Image (cartoon, rainbow, N blue to C red):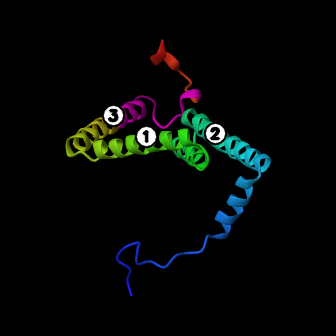
Amino acid sequence: MAIKNEEAAPPTAPRRVHRFRARIRRNRLLNTVWRLGVFVVGTTVMLGGLVMMVTPGPGLLGIIVGLAILATEFAWAQRALHRARAAADRAKEKALDPRTRRRNLILGALATALAAGAITAYLAIYGFVVPWAIDDPTFWT
């Protein structure tokens, strides 16, 4: 028996998480502490994502997860997350554009050919010797 619309669906009881959150919202101090905790955790994850933008790691993922954590409690974070998702969708569509893909493939092939030529030239001049172990550096002078 499939339900075609929401009106035909039987009412569901609030889940345990929703009851827990409603209990916290009723107490002003607990609600403030909860929101502060969400803010601290979300900001920490988002700052970790920002750090990972310049260091190795999934920076964009960290930023989006941090915004998602913040969006559970703050409307401004929901708006920022919505804009970030829209920008990610636009970037995905742009990356999947056939002309852009073809250009990126050509540039990648040219970069690979250039790197292979540089490696071949190095091996032809010095053989298989690491740069810091070259005995006669006359090429560099």
Specify the quadrant that holds the N terminus. Answer: bottom left
Residue 104 horizontal/vertical position (percent): 28, 39
Going by the image, does 111 lie left or right of 80?
left
What's the residue at 45%, 41% (across, down)? 84
- Majority secondary structure of magenta residues: helix
Q: Which residue is mark 3?
A: 117
Q: Nearer the viewer, residue 40 or 124?
A: 40
Q: Secondary structure at mark 1?
A: helix
Q: Which residue is mark 1?
A: 83
Q: Quadrant of residue 125?
A: top left
Q: CA distance from mark 2 to mark 3?
A: 39 Å
Q: Relative to 120, say whether 89 is above or below.
A: below
What's the residue at 55%, 26% (across, down)? 134
Kind of residue at disc 1: Arg
Which circle marks residue 97 in the picture?
Answer: none
Q: Quadrant of residue 102?
A: top left
Which range is magenta? 115-132
Q: Relative to 130, say whether 140 is above or below.
A: above
Q: Nearer the viewer, residue 124 or 84?
A: 84
Q: Quadrant of residue 119?
A: top left
Which circle marks residue 48 in the picture?
Answer: 2
Q: Nearer the viewer, residue 7 or 101?
A: 7
Look at the image and say whether residue 111 sits in the magenta stretch: no
Q: Secondary structure at mark 2?
A: helix
Kind of residue at disc 2: Gly
Kind of residue at disc 3: Gly
Q: CA distance from mark 1 to mark 2?
A: 20 Å
Residue reaching furthest to the bottom: 1
Of marks 2 and 3, which one's residue comes earlier in the chain?
A: 2
